[in-house]
Image: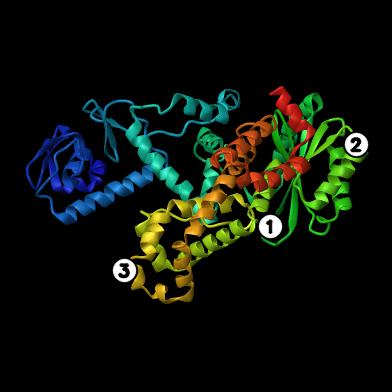
Amino acid sequence: MADESSRKDPAWKYGQLQNDQNINTFVCGFCSKVTKGGVYRMKQHLVGGYRNVTAGTKCPDHVKEEIKEYMSKKKDIKEQRNLIVDIDVEDYDIEDKDEGSVSVNNKATPRGPSLKKPRQKGPMDAFFTPNPETVVQNRKDKGKQTSLNATYKKEMREHTIQRIARWFYDAGVPLNACTYESFAPMIESIGQFGPGLKPPSYHELRVPCLKKELEATNELMSNHKVEWAKVGCTVMADGWTDRRNRTLINFLVNSPKGTMFIESIDASFYVKDGKKMFELLDNFVDQIGEANVVQVVTDSASANVMAGRLLEAKRPQLIWSPCAAHCLDLMLEDIYKISNIRKALKRGIEISNFIYVRPGLLNMMRRFTNQKELVRPAKTRFATACITLSSIHRQKNNLRKMFTSDEWKDSKWSKEQQGKRVVQTILLASFWTTIVFALKVSGPLVRVLRLVDGEKKPPMGYIYEAMDRAKEAIAKSFNNNEEKYKDIFTIIDKRWELQLHRPLHAAGRMMK
C-alpha cells in the first residue's frame, strides 16, 4: 500500500486503487475505467493523447489542465537535474509512477529524490574519450543510428537544439556558422564533458584560448611550409575594398597541400603605385622564402603589372602571372564596350531597373514569367552582364506579352515616359538581335571564367584548351562566317597574348 508521501500526486484525488494491496491498478473517478501501470498511467488516462492508454472522455477540462501542469513541472525538474534514466526496455516494463516509486515489472521500488546521478568523470576519461572530430566523421559515414531510447533522446535533442539556436539569435551570429567544420566537433566535446560544464569567460576566449589557437595554426602552417620547400608554391595577392572603402590585399600561399591565408594589409595609400606594390610583393617573397616561390599571381591592374615586371627582373627564377579570372573579365569588359552591345546592355539594365524599383510592376512580371526573375547586373563582374542579358532573352515572349497586355495599358506605369521607352525597347527587333550576338560571343568566355574561377581542380593545365574550345564555339555559332566574329577574336587574342599567354600555363598544358 502506498504511504502518504506518495499520494501528493494530484491524480490520487480523481481515482482510487482497485485493490489496496496493489498500487498499480487504478479506477477512474469519472468514468470508472480501470488502468494498469500506477498513478502515471492514471494521469495519462485523465489528460488523454497517449498511445499507451485510453483517454478519459468524462474528465473535466480544469482537471486536465491541473494534471498537465503538474506533469510539465515534474518533467522540467527532472531534465534540469539530469534525473531521467536512459531506458533500454519497453515503456510497459519501467514507468515513473510518482515522486516516491518506480514500477519495474509491476513491482514498486522505493527511491530517493533522484533517479540517477550523473556519471563522474575521472583521469582515465582523458585517455579513453574519443576524439570529437573522429566521432563526427564516423557519424557521417555510418549514417543515422537507431536506439530503443529514440523517443526520449529526440525530445531532449529538440530542447538542446532550441537553446543553441537561441544563442545564435541572441548573439546575432550568422546562421551559416553552423556549417563550419569546427562546429560539430565543438558540440560533441560539450556532450563528452557531460553536465556541469562551465562556459568560457571573456578573458579565456580573448587570451589563453586565442594563444592556443594561434599555436595550433602555426603547427598547421609548419606542415604547409614543409610542402613549400619540397615542391614549391604560388604566392597570391587578392585585392578588395571593404565597407570603409579601404583597399585591402589578402596574401595567400597555394601548394598541392592547399591554400593558406597568411595576412591582410591595408594598401589604400599605395595600391596604385607600381614601385610600392613591388616592394610589398618583394618583402612577402622574402617572408615565404625565395627558394620556395615559383610564381606570384596578382590581378591585371597597371600598378600590379609594373610590380610583377620589377619582381621578375630582380628574381629571374620567379614568374609573375596575372589572375586568369581577372583577365577573362577584362576580355568581357572589352567586348561589352562595342557600341551596339553596350547600347543593348544599357537598355537591358534599364528594363530590369524599371521593373524592380516598382513592387506592383514586379509582381505583374512574376505572374507573366511564372515567378522567374531577371538577374540584375553587379558593378564589377562583366560576366553578370552576360547572365542578365541571357535571363532577359529567355523571358522575351513573356515580357512582350506583359507590355502589350490590357493590364499594362491600364496601369499607371504605362503613362510614365520611362515606361513608354521600355515598351519601345521590348518591341524593337534590333534589340533582341544584338542580345543574341552578345550571348554568342560572350557565353563561351563565361564558361571558361567559371572554370578558372572555381576550386574543383587547378585550371592552369586546362586554360589553353578551354580558350581554344571557346573560340571554336564562337565560330560555330556564326557558321564559321569570320566576318561576323573577327573583331571579337581580335579582342580575345590581344588580351591573351598580353596577359594569359604565360610560360607556366604552357608548361601546365604540356604536363596535363
Identified by mark 1, the residue type is Asp
62 versus 226 height, above or below: below
The CA distance from mark 2 to mark 1 is: 32 Å
Specify few, some or many for label 1: CA neighbours under 10 Å numbering under 14, 14-19, or 20 or more: few
Q: Which residue is mark 2?
A: 315
- Identify which residue is drawn at 74% across, 32% down: 505
**Left/right of residue 502 with respect to residue 404 in the rendered view:** right
Query: Residue 4, relative to residue 411: is it above or below?
Result: above
Identify the amino acid type marked 3.
Answer: Asp
Taking depth in this image into account, of 259 and 67 the one nearest to the observer is 259
Query: Would you call the spot at circle 3 few (<14 residues within 10 Å), some (14-19), or many (20 or more)?
Result: few
For numbered disc 2, what is the local secondary structure? loop
Residue 151, given in percent of the width and then of the height, sits at 32, 35
Inter-mark Cα distance, 3 to 1: 47 Å
Residue 89 visible (yes or no): yes
Query: Which residue is identified by label 1?
Result: 242
The reply to whether the C-beta atoms of the residues labelled 2 and 1 are less than 8 Å apart is no
Picture coordinates of residue 48, whole percent (x, y): 18, 45
In front of the other: 361 or 465: 465
Which badge, 3 or 1, comes first in the chain's sequence? 1
- Residue located 44% across and 44% down the image: 161
- Determine whether label 2 and label 3 are within 8 Å by CB: no
Q: Point out the tag, 2 or 3, that comes first from the N-terminus.
A: 2
